[in-house]
Amino acid sequence: MDFILEMQKVIDLIEQYETENIHKAASACADSIAAGRAALMFGAGHSALPPQEAFPRIGSIVGFVQITEPELGFNGFVTGKGGHKQMSFLEQMSGFAQVILSNYNLTAQDTLIVFSNSGINALPVELCDLANKQSLTTISVSSTAHSLAHAPKNPQGKRLMEVAKIHIDTHVPEGDTLVTYNEHIHTGGGSTIAGMIIMNAIVVETVRLLHQRGVPLHICPSHNVSSNMKEVIRKEEAMFEAYKQLIAKL
């Protein structure tokens, strides 16, 4: 139960200190989606997991788009093809962000959320900086404690939280692990769950704001049901069509 107790402390800190910034982030996402544009999300390694909670996800809406790079989003092979070494190398490579964003037609009406627990590597920092130069609203989700404890590992000499227009602290301690048994045993990574909590909070608040404004929503339904499948299929098809139209703009 040690991990659950420590994770709950992190969640309590997020609720206590990050509510205002989560509201700001959701407001930016709502503005983008209401304008027919996108709330984009990016993360490398385990930081690629929170964006997957946004869309496609039951209860979420068309408008959230993950910038997906296969070599950065899955390294379960650990070694060899698609291994962890490659992911770490690319995350620290200056210039890769420019290559990624060259695939997108972004506008000032878009929002970008960048997840990076450390907030010091070149890729997330440069991605955020390039988005700023295109006048997007940029949001960072990272550990303030970890970022401040370590020097930036990018040519700009900046941390993600220093580049983004809105910063949301995961309140995960330096090093990410939540449980310590002795000086050599630190276990229980907390940043992924903290990021997912924050991502879902942004999604729900975005939905609330758009509903208040009367903006039509395409909500991802659960297809794991045994009744009224025709209605589920209708909603799914409408959702897929709306998503195709959004992606065509990007």
Image (cartoon, helix red, strand yellow):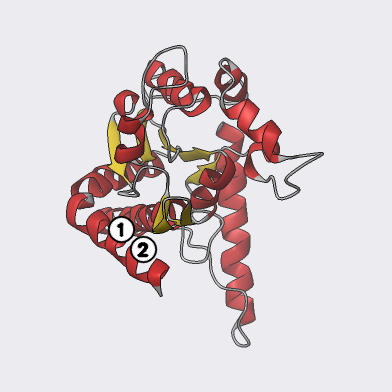
Which residue is painted at 33% across and 32% down in the image? 149
Q: Label 2 near label 1: C-beta < 8 Å?
A: yes
The crowd level at tag 1 (other Cα within 10 Å; few <14, some 14-19, many 20+) is many
Picture coordinates of residue 132, whole percent (x, y): 37, 21
Q: Name the residue furthest right.
A: 80
Apparent side of residue 91 relative to residue 139 in the rendered image (left or right): right
Picture coordinates of residue 80, whole percent (x, y): 81, 39
Q: Name the residue furthest top.
A: 155
Picture coordinates of residue 195, whole percent (x, y): 41, 51
Could you say which disc has been placed on residue 7 in the image? 2
Which residue is painted at 34% across and 57% down in the image? 201
Could you say which disc has been placed on residue 10 in the image? 1
Q: Nearer the viewer, residue 137 or 190?
A: 190
Q: CA distance from mark 1 to mark 2?
A: 5 Å
Give the amino acid type for the residue marked by disc 1 in the picture.
Val
Give the amino acid type for the residue marked by disc 2 in the picture.
Met
Picture coordinates of residue 172, whole percent (x, y): 35, 49
The crowd level at tag 2 (other Cα within 10 Å; few <14, some 14-19, many 20+) is many
